[in-house]
Image (tube, rainbow, N blue to C red):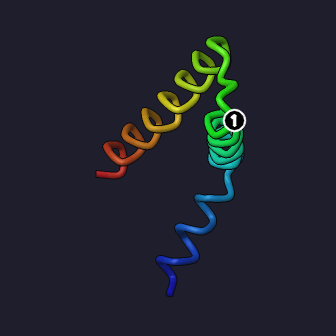
Amino acid sequence: MEIIWKRLSRLLTVKSLVTLALTAVFSCLALCGNIDQDFMTIYAVIISFYFGTQTSEKEVEK
């Protein structure tokens, strides 16, 4: 049960909330077919940052 609470607390960080919100916006734009190139660039940078920091945090924990 403690593991679930720990994962939920990590999910509620600012960078996770921003990533989830941008993914929701990206999904809506993709369904409508209105994805702008500038938005794609910003989205790619933010997703790369999010997964890059997750990977580096896991390596530090080990």
Q: Position of residue 32 (x, y in %)?
A: 69, 35
Q: Position of residue 30 (x, y in %)?
A: 61, 35
Q: Nearer the viewer, residue 51 or 6?
A: 51
The residue pinned by badge 1 equals 32
Residue extending farthest to the top is 38
Above or below residue 34? Residue 12 is: below
Q: Position of residue 38 (x, y in %)?
A: 66, 12
The residue positioned 63% from the left and 65% from the top of the image is: 9
Which amino acid does the dot numbered 1 rest on? Cys
The residue positioned 44% from the left and 43% from the top of the image is: 54
Q: Quadrant of residue 46?
A: top right
The residue positioned 69% from the left and 41% from the top of the image is: 28
Q: Quadrant of residue 37?
A: top right
SS at circle 1: helix
Above or below residue 43? Residue 10 is: below
Residue extending farthest to the front is 32
Mark 1 neighbour density, 10 Å: few (under 14) some (14–19) many (20 or more): few
